[in-house]
Image (cartoon, rainbow, N blue to C red):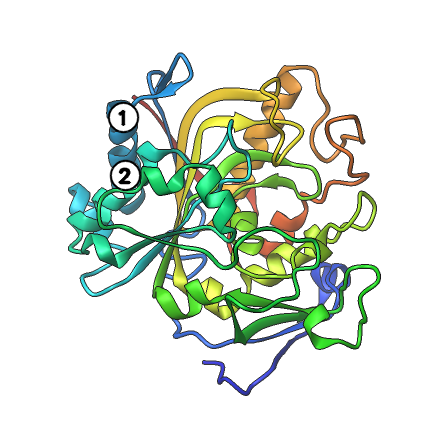
Amino acid sequence: MITRRQMLSTSLVGAAGMLLPSFRFQSKAAASKLGIPGSYRGRVVAVQHPASIVSGKFQAEPIRNMMHKGMLELTGAGNWAEAWRAFVEPGDVVGIKVNPVGQPNVISCAEVIHEIVDGLKAAGLKAKDVVVYDRYRLQFLSAGFDKMLPEGVRQSYAVDDYDDIQLDIEGYDPEHYLDMALVRPGQDPSNPHARRSYVAKFLSQEVNKLINLPVLKDHQSAGVTLALKNLSHGLVNNVSRSHSSGTLNACGTFIPAVVSLPMIRQKTVLHILDGIKGLYHGGPGIRKTEFVWEHKTMYFATDPVALDRVGWRVIDDKRVQVGMKSIAESKPDPHSTFLNRQVEHIEIAGALGLGEWDEKKVDVKRIEL
């Protein structure tokens, strides 16, 4: 247990220590067996359904079947309600972190959101105890998430809209932050706010558990934006310092450092990767459709490192299939301008104990419906 006044300085040894700049965090959160990497370290369930999307439209019944099968296989539960009770109980207030950045082409879909809410209600939660969140209110609304929500489900944001500076902490909790030796060019390194990323009040004050709902996407600076990055760049402020230019890129270290924050690590209990549609190049927010494909697969895990390891390979396999280089080998082009894309954030997260990196220890169960 880390007290409010205690500063935990992180000192790493070996390869991970050489890769990570100094960082420390002030945060507290009750230790939980459900916290990252969760109850099923190294386990990933992949459920594919060929009818999950037809003529570009998501299909509710096949997606419902995918959700039920994935949750039962992940948990070993006998029924839908029991599967959700592995993570939540009446009295919990549960947040759902969606992803709107790839709008209009690749975002968290309404059908999956509805099934998550249905599962939470089956486990005994009331609709008002479910809060769907993204960091920016205007992105949330422009993606249409407010129109997707089942009746009674609440919505939340950290701030109104994106800005480049991102040092305003209104909407963020000054008691929970990462202090990292990294600032945007032009900012004063002696200013503690320029070095810190504060956790959204949504997570620290509104909910006691979080379900992470990322999508299957390429990302210019991070390589991929899957479970880990949906947390790191969606739950704190001052994130643009992690990729402030095509050559000043620190996503490889920033992402695992943020996810290590106790407030994020202990409250995040489940990751459901929406891979019905995917983006294999030009991400995260490209509006063109040339790199979008229908993957028709959902992934379920409590371990974000194992899940991202699997998702990274899926995207690389698609790139190779269409004649492109893998993410790690790719160089800048008109659609992806970063010099070195830092997909190594997944391996570093594994070195920090956030999950299972070794593919030999990652158990992927693939199911076709």
Q: In x, y percent, where is residue 42?
A: 45, 48
Q: Quadrant for residue 101, please give it.
A: top right
Q: In x, y percent, where is residue 84?
A: 23, 50
| CB within 8 Å, label 2 to label 1 | yes
Residue drawn at point x = 78 percent, y = 34 percent: 337
Residue 275, placed above or below residue 254: above
Q: Residues within 10 Å of mark 2 (few under 14, many from 20)?
A: some
Which residue type does callout 1 highlight?
Answer: Ala
Q: Quadrant for residue 61, please give it.
A: top left
Residue 122 visible? The answer is yes
Disc 2 from disc 1: Cα separation: 9 Å
Q: Nearer the viewer, residue 115 or 316?
A: 115
Instruction: Judge from the rendering whether residue 159 lies leftward or rightward of residue 85; answer left or right.
Output: right
According to the image, label 1 marks what residue? 60
Residue 362 visible? The answer is no
Residue drawn at point x = 75 percent, y = 69 percent: 181
Could you say whether the residue bearing mark 2 is in a helix, strand or loop? helix
Which residue type does callout 2 highlight?
Answer: His
Residue 233, placed above or below residue 48: below
According to the image, label 2 marks what residue? 114
Instruction: Judge from the rendering whether residue 358 lies leftward or rightward of residue 21; answer left or right.
Output: left
Instruction: Judge from the rendering whether residue 341 lies leftward or rightward of residue 62; answer left or right.
Output: right
Could you say whether the residue bearing mark 1 is in a helix, strand or loop? helix
